[in-house]
Image (spheres, rainbow, N blue to C red):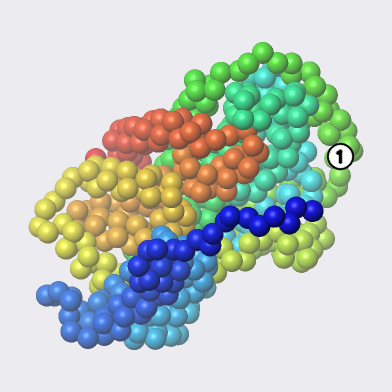
Amino acid sequence: MDSRPTNTRPSFDRRPLALVLLERNWRWVVYAALAMLLVNSTGDPWAQGLDPKAQRALAIFVVCIVLWVFNLLPLMITSILALVLPPIMDVMPAQEAYSLFGNKVIFFLLGAFILAAALSRSGLAERITLTALRLSGGSPRRLSIGIYVTGAVLSTVMSEHAVAALLFPIVLELCRVMELEPRRSSLGRLLFLSMAWGCISGGVITLLGGARGPLALGILFQTTGTSIGFFEWVLDLLPASLLTLGAGYGLLALFFPIEKTQAAPAEEFLRKRERKLGRLSVRELAVGAIMAATIYSWVMFEHVLGLAEVSLLAVVALFALRLINWREVEESVNWGVVLMYGGAVALGFTLSKSGAAHWLAESLLQGSSPSPFALIALLAVLTIFLTEAVSNAAVVSVLMPLGLALAEPLSVDPKAVTYAIAYVSGLPHVLPMGTPALALAFSSGYLRVRHSVVAGLAFNLALLVIFLIVVKFYWPLMNMGSF
């Protein structure tokens, strides 16, 4: 063993002590600043015409924005704070604040999560995936289209994150059997981005692809009393959804050319995997029938029964027929998300009822009167850039109360504001932190950030153009006013 002394010298941080302490304890500095803001909000008015109760609500809003945007606390913990601060700060009674957690949209969301768990646990979702990919095979191009379309279609009935998690190991194995080299294969990049982009683009077509839609609907209903039905959402956004879906794959094909490779090994792998599943089981058939009946009821009877009631009846049917058990539900449902949305709905209602949202809107407008089209365009642009770096739930929670407050004096349909925020926030395509589907694609080892940034920015531009064309020419036909 070499025992010779080394010439290394201890290194010292020569920066000022205050800077070192700030870097190591910056979270506590922010917490202290936010606490001081809350305390200060109970004192003299910050501005003329600002009601004391609205001032305290505004302080709560700012605290939650900072915690959400900088992820200083888990999203669901910040949402709990949004639920408990209004009673503590005497903005609204505790009974009223906690009752907001019982919003019907939260129960619709819970039912949708359990239905998705049944689809996944029964094996039906995997069978549909494998069958669709096998039928679309034959060439690398068709395989990539198959992955894209399968992800999009499944994301209309399941969370896009769950669909991406289902597709990921299959796409990874397809790349392996086709001997696609990580970081070098353009086809490998195409397949994984087809998986991610397909799930993302399909997830905004219905209310089942992600929880941001139900969250926005909850804030809309609590704030304005306006509701949007399941089929109404689909119909109002269908042209934008279909055009966005087509543009997405067109951009992928443009940016990621396919190198010469054989698709036969991939087809063989899919056949073997499908055979391993065996014959279609009674459980899969029953789950499929309940899912179909649920969607039919949402479309046909939503105004008679309600979205939440249909969801919960479907859940009862799943348990009554023993198609799922509680342990599977506990393992599959993200309970933190349910907490998060309950608090976010409460925050939106707090801003509206206290008058803080109205004061904020008046302060921003300052007597000006932008056109309805300009407001929707501004909200869409702001949303698409925020959602690339911040959770779409946080984006919806922050922008919905503000957007609805701005819409009122301009006589803009609150549904239009809801779509501009909830729909666009579900389409991050640039950075992996924007959505778990993209993060999964990056974890494969086939992608670098630069691969996604250029194509993703092009997609964002195409999305905004498509969305604003739909706003201008299609929405007036759907009785949402003229833009």
Q: Amino acid at mark 1?
A: Leu
Spot occupied by residue 21 in the image (x, y as percentages of width and height): 41, 71
425 vs 43: above or below: above
* Residue 365 placement: quadrant: bottom left
> In the image, what residue occupies the spot 43% across and 50% down?
389
Q: Residue furthest front?
A: 4
Q: Where 164 sits versus 361, above or below? A: above
- Whether residue 21 is visible here, answered yes or no, is yes
Residue 284 sits above or below residue 195 on the image:
below
Asked if residue 353 can be seen in this view, the reply is no
Callout 1 crowding tier (Cα within 10 Å): few <14, some 14–19, many ≥20: some
Q: Label 1's element?
A: helix
Q: Which residue is mark 1?
A: 277
112 relative position to 47: left or right: right
Q: Position of residue 301 (x, y in %)?
A: 56, 53
Name the residue: 51% across, 71% down: 77
Residue most extreme to the left: 367
